[in-house]
Image: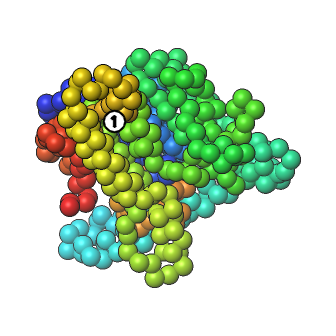
């Protein structure tokens, strides 16, 4: 699918990628959807698996970006299951007359093979990503105390991402979030301030106790999701403020049904914890932007002769500058066959489903290209979400 749409000339087009392990293939599908219409970000910000996707996105030119994302995900996921494909093919033989029965059998089959793939990830690790640590969890050093080793992902990142390109901030700004283990503070590693290495991306995804802390310049870091799993506020608070088109791609939905068994409870806990209440964050940002606009308008009402006498007016204007933000929000919706293990279920089949869901959501969003328009006069922050019509 390819079509031409008119894209407003935003100074910034930002991609905001949440963490979520195996669910991250959904973000790759979104990237494919953006490429189809020739829309390329000039700033990527991510946490955990979102940070790893950022590395591949920033580390490749637009023409090879999707292909290398696909190879990256093929590498860290298990090859297609011959047994699963055989069972799905057998189910297809029943034809449309047995739709309900086939759907029930397909869901049962997906759950069975999905849980098996998740169990193998726990027992064996994932190729090109993480491996079980001998005599786990270890002890002594923060870098050696975990259930898995993550050195393999360094080679995978270097294979599919050019770090010279990643550090070319004029081509694309790159920001990845992590948690300082000693202080508990959330930090961003940004290519406008430091030279990014695989360790910075590894630190952003070092979720304890599974993965070890990563040492950078004498400090140890864990997964940014320990504090916040959504980097939207980092984009919004950047000075100088500029008109910005934001694609916020989340992997956990804060909204969901009330669980009725222990496995559903475990899954729901993850959804709530790692969603970082993104709609609440978005609403808070919207309220803040409205207040900024009101204060900016009030400053504009003060005569220039008065403003010249007090430099604080200029300082306030700089902080409040009424840039416009359009936030396109995409949130992955759980498929019925997923369980609490969905973030470490790295089967090829499920990865493809996640990817296709991201691509479909992006295409559906862009069915109405007006969603990309600059906010109308009097507004400086608008949101669009095909899954959540207000």
For the C terminus, the image quarter is bottom left
Circle 1: is it few (<14), some (14-19), or many (20+) Cα within 10 Å? many
Rendered position, 43 above or below 249: above
- Within the image, what quadrant is residue 60 found in? top left
Using residue 23 as the reference point, say whether residue 216 is left or right of it. Answer: right
Using residue 85 as the reference point, say whether residue 289 is left or right of it. Answer: left
Question: Regarding mark 1 in the picture, which secondary structure is present there?
Answer: helix
Rendered position, 40 above or below 334: above
**Residue 156 drawn at (x, y percent):** 58, 32
- Within the image, what quadrant is residue 61 found in? top left
Q: Nearer the viewer, residue 116 or 304?
A: 304
What residue would you read off at disc 1?
320
**Residue 62 drawn at (x, y percent):** 34, 24
Residue at (73, 53) in percent of width and height: 147
**Residue 86 drawn at (x, y percent):** 42, 59
Rendered position, 345 above or below 28: below
**Residue 2 drawn at (x, y percent):** 18, 34
Q: Nearer the viewer, residue 97 or 197?
A: 197
Residue at (48, 74) in percent of width and height: 264
For the N terminus, the image quarter is top left
Report whether residue 46 is seen.
Answer: yes
Using residue 65 as the reference point, say whether residue 203 is left or right of it. Answer: right
Residue at (13, 30) in percent of width and height: 6
Q: State how the image is colored.
A: rainbow
């Amino acid at each position: 699918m390819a079509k031409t749409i008119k894209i407003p000339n935003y100074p910034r087009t930002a991609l905001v990628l949440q963490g979520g392990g195996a669910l991250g293939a959904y973000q790759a599908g979104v990237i494919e959807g953006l490429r189809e219409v020739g829309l390329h970000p000039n700033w990527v910000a991510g946490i955990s698996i979102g940070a790893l996707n950022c590395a591949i996105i920033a580390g490749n030119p637009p023409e090879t970006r999707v292909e290398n994302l696909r190879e990256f995900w093929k590498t860290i996921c298990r090859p297609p299951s011959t047994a699963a494909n055989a069972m799905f093919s057998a189910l297809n033989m029943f034809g449309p007359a047995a739709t309900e029965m086939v759907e029930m059998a397909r869901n049962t089959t997906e759950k069975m093979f999905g849980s098996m793939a998740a169990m193998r990830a726990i027992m064996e690790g994932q190729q090109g990503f993480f491996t079980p640590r001998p005599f786990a969890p270890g002890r002594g050093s923060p870098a050696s105390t975990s259930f898995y080793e993550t050195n393999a992902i360094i080679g995978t990142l270097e294979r599919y991402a050019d770090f010279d390109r990643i550090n070319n901030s004029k081509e694309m700004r790159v920001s990845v979030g992590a948690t300082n283990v000693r202080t508990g503070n959330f930090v961003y590693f940004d290519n406008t301030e430091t030279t990014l290495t695989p360790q910075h991306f590894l630190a952003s995804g070092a979720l304890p106790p599974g993965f070890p802390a990563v040492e950078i310049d004498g400090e140890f870091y864990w997964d940014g999701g320990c504090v916040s799993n959504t980097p939207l506020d980092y984009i919004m608070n950047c000075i100088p403020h500029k008109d910005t088109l934001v694609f916020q791609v989340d992997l956990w939905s804060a909204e969901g049904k009330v669980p009725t068994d222990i496995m559903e409870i475990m899954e729901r806990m993850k959804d709530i914890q790692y969603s970082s209440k993104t709609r609440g964050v978005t609403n808070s940002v919207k309220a803040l932007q409205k207040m900024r606009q009101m204060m900016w308008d009030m400053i504009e009402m003060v005569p220039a002769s008065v403003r010249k006498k007090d430099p604080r007016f200029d300082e306030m204007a700089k902080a409040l500058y009424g840039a416009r933000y359009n936030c396109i929000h995409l949130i992955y919706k759980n498929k019925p066959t997923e369980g609490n293990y969905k973030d470490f279920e790295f089967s090829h089949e499920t990865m493809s489903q996640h990817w296709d869901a991201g691509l479909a959501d992006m295409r559906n969003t862009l069915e109405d290209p007006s969603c990309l328009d600059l906010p109308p006069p009097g507004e400086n922050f608008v949101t669009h979400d095909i899954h959540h019509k207000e």
